[in-house]
Amino acid sequence: MSASAQKAMYQDDPDIHNVVHSDSQVVRKVLLVDEQAHILRVLRLNLDRQGYEVDMALNSENALFMMREHSYDVLIITSDLPDMSARQLCENLEQQLVNNNPLVLVGAREDDAWLESSSTAERLDVPVSLRWIVARLSEAFGDCR
């Protein structure tokens, strides 16, 4: 069975995170942050299919913990959270981001001017476009499908 067939077979199993790729590509790690589980599931399913390893956080406390415990290539915050704004979350992560330096995409409204001056985050237009996310990740890394 090919690696892609194995991946398809296990894509909905939350315990399967590391998929062996037959073409020896680097597996990029993504942390998705949103308060709505259904949005996270849709993004995760699609990014899994593109060859990314995806973790999810439903609130800022979990996101901060995950960033302390793991190294990510990409952090995607699709919107403000009930317990913390995307801006506050990015500011809290700034120390950790210096060491890891992931690509940070933040779902933002047009009036989120702070993103223009941020050295760690890029604007992710809302509503979130999965096609744009995949294109941006391909542009940034060039090594995932």
Image: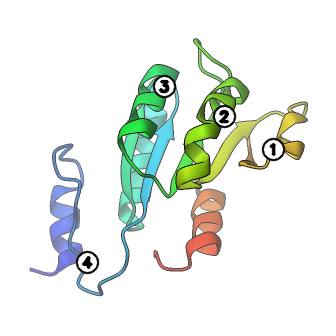
Q: CA distance from mark 1 to mark 2?
A: 9 Å
Q: CA distance from mark 1 to mark 3?
A: 25 Å
The residue under label 3 is: 36
Q: Amino acid at mark 2?
A: Cys
- Can residue 88 be seen by looking at this rendering? yes
Q: Are marks 4 and 3 in contact (CB under 8 Å)?
A: no
The residue under label 2 is: 90
Q: Are marks 4 and 2 in contact (CB under 8 Å)?
A: no
Q: CA distance from mark 2 to mark 3?
A: 19 Å
The residue under label 4 is: 21
Secondary structure beneath label 4:
loop
Tell me if mark 4 has few (under 14), some (14-19) or many (20+) residues whose alpha carbon lies within 10 angstroms of its own. Answer: some
Q: Amino acid at mark 1?
A: Ser
Query: Image quadrant for the N terminus?
Result: bottom left
Secondary structure beneath label 3:
loop
- In the image, which disc is placed on residue 118? 1
Mark 1 or 4, closer to the camera: 1
